[in-house]
Image (cartoon, grey):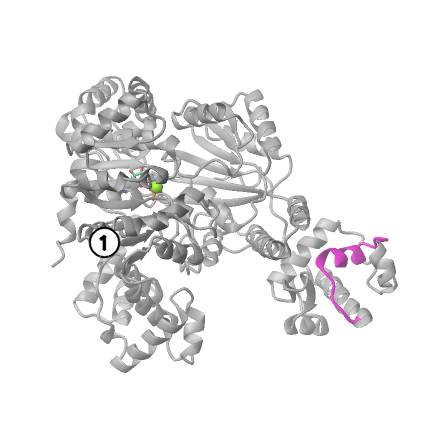
Amino acid sequence: MHPPSHDFLPLLKQHFGFDSFRPLQQDIVRDALEGLDVFAVLPTGGGKSLCFQLPALARPGLTVVVSPLIALMKDQVDSLRASGIAATFLNSSLSSQETRDRLRGLFNHEFSLLYISPERLLIPGFTNDLQAWKIARLAVDEAHCISEWGHDFRPEYRQLAGIRSLLPNTPIIALTATATSRVRQDIVDQLHLNNPRCYVASFDRPNLSYRVTGKSGAARQTLAFIKERPGQCGIVYCQSRKTVEAVAASLVAAGVAARPYHAGLDPAQRASHQDLFLRDDIQVMCATIAFGMGINKSNVRFVIHYDLPKNIEGYYQETGRAGRDGLPSDCMLLFSPGDVVKQSQFIEEKTDPHDQTVAREQLRLMIHFAESNACRRKELLAYFSENYLPSNCGGCDNCLSPRETYDGTFLAQKFLSCVFRVREKSGFAVGLNHLVDILTGQAGEKIQKWGHDQLSTYGIGKDQTRSDWATIGRELIRLGYASQNAAHYNTLELTTQGRSLLRERRPVFLTKPLCTPPQEAQKPARTGGIPCDEKLFEQLRSLRKQLADQRNVPAYVVFSDAALRDMARIYPTDEREFATVNGVGAAKLRDFSNVFTAEVTRFLRENPRQDFSKHSSEAPNPRSQEPTSPGSIHESAEATWQQFRRGASVQTIAEERALSERTVYEHLVRGIQSGESIDLGRFLTSEQQQEVISAFANLGLERLAPVRENLGGRYDFETLKIVRATLSKPSHLG
Ligand code: ADP
Ligand code: MG
């Protein structure tokens, strides 16, 4: 019934020059072509555009794409045109003559793709035009803009709620990178998607490395980080407009091509700075969070958070703008306890108590992430209810250089007994700041009023700074010795574990504060690297820039960095070789083969040819015990599946392949997620299946622990994951 997946591969190569699909792309394309409504949640860089672009090329008819970013429509359409795809856009930036020409083309069925703003779609009578243009499907990109719960709500998008009744028979495909389930559900409801097939990809970005660095001399740290990466583009996110301006100025003064971007700049200037960045004319954009959504620039190599973000969702989306081309890219967060204080003050200034509670909790989780000594990737994904299995991701500071610990028994005793004494004396609990005040012997009003200067723990922590104590307190909470009551002013209580620690005086090891460079100068190695002839790469880069400028488009529209690196390892000198480059489709072969192969030929006259055939295209992943790079997981999972299809059990596969059973299960889950079917009968009897499936139906697919508990712990997590993968692929939103 379904065309086999490889049916789309020739089309993928012909138009985009790619040899394989990213996860879920082919299922989404297939469902869209069957005329189903589809809801696709893929992380930034996951390749959402292709999910509606390929169907548009596979069949006649017009695909209409709603996008919130008028300023970026031109670039998107230019990109498509560079690949020889008949695309156009309509928005207020066009002259009336241009608009008339495009409308004529649409009535003549000259286009496969039309980009428009949501306002345009709802102009009375426009849907009649769409019918005349033979609309085949509607794609709603950045669909989270429809939800007030999201961080990018756009009132114009809200009007899309009426679109289903205007186009009752047009299949809709909605796409977003939003990771929160509330927003996802809102999208499905608001758009009135009809029994949609829902796809949710993993939110892991294996090519991104994460690190958190102690902030001290932030301007200097930022400059050093950028100087280590000559020629690489990146974004520095700052909290306030003032900081944006100051950081941009200090970078410019140090010789870095940087510009500011924030909502306080006049629109023309903002647009011009954005353009400079997209076109590789500047290296660094210093920005508030106003910058970034929909920026398709694929070669952003780093994202620095100069200040502490307000929440993890924002942090994840902002870092996500690095490395859309799949090449290794670095994310650095500068963290200081001072920023915690600043952010907390902002929260206290809010007037709505509900907003305050939400913001406090979000900040708490953000601080937890920054201070944690656990794998950053695991923590990030856990925030989105995703379980990251490998024990070492090989691409975050905590996995690459585990943080040093010290014997904190004495400090923990002081802190916890202070919590105990306060409760004993006053009969109520207090917050972290107040405890720190007592420990450091402050003479505050509340201290006096409550007589806390009479406590035996008053002033016993004078040797430590206030911020040291706050850090220690937060770690003791993380370790489970004290708990913080979010519903009650974040006051602290001892847990059972904390009480027994106090009683038994067991040793406690605490994490040393975050290091600041230069100790951790080594760069995390990430997967997805393409070793290549760096000198040739540089030459191809400047050729690309020249060609892009001639055509007045951003460089990545001509070729991505990934395509250039591929060229710089296979040295194509004729059309046949050039055609094999990843990212070279028919149109780019026609337009660029001569000029690039000539450049390579010239290069080879003066330079030796290096051999990259032995290298895999993945960078080494030194510490990792289990394969974590996308390529090797893919190959390894394929081998697992071959055995599994032949009937081997998980246990046998694990033994024969010297993998843990967990890894084998993980391979199975990944396979199911990318379209393999599995007979649950190999894991569970049909009664068991019924039982497990109804537990998921009642409790949702998001979290496994409650489901497991509901089933009395009779099923292990691995089996539940298999069932869950089967249920969520493809199905209705749980
Ligand atoms: P998203 O909208 O999900 O953030 P995009 O659609 O902008 O992602 O794609 C990100 C990058 O990945 C683009 O440079 C695109 O050309 C590239 N890409 C998409 N699909 C594939 C694929 N199957 N193989 C290789 N590169 C791909
Ligand atoms: Mg996109």
Badge 1 local density, few (<14 within 10 Å), some, or many (20+)?
many
Q: In this view, does 237 lie to the left or right of 680?
A: right
Residue 91 found in image quarter: top left
Image region (quadrant) for ligand 2: top left
- Residue type highlighted by circle 1: Asp
Image: 578 above or below 403 = above
Asked if one can make out residue 629 in the rendered structure from this viewpoint, the answer is no
Q: Where is residue 138 in the image (x, y as percent from the top left)?
A: 26, 45
Magenta region includes residue 439:
yes
The residue at the point 43 percent across, 24 percent down is 276
Quarter in which the N terminus is drawn:
bottom left
The residue at the point 21 percent across, 54 percent down is 31
Asked if one can make out residue 308 in the rendered structure from this viewpoint, the answer is yes
Magenta region includes residue 24:
no
Q: Nearer the viewer, residue 692 or 666?
A: 692
Dot 1 falls on a residue whose secondary structure is helix
Q: Nearer the viewer, residue 180 or 367?
A: 180
Residue under pointer 1: 27
The residue at the point 46 percent across, 42 percent down is 319
Quarter in which the C terminus is drawn:
bottom left
Magenta-drawn segment: 427-444
Q: Is residue 530 left or right of residue 407?
A: left
Image: 9 above or below 355 = above
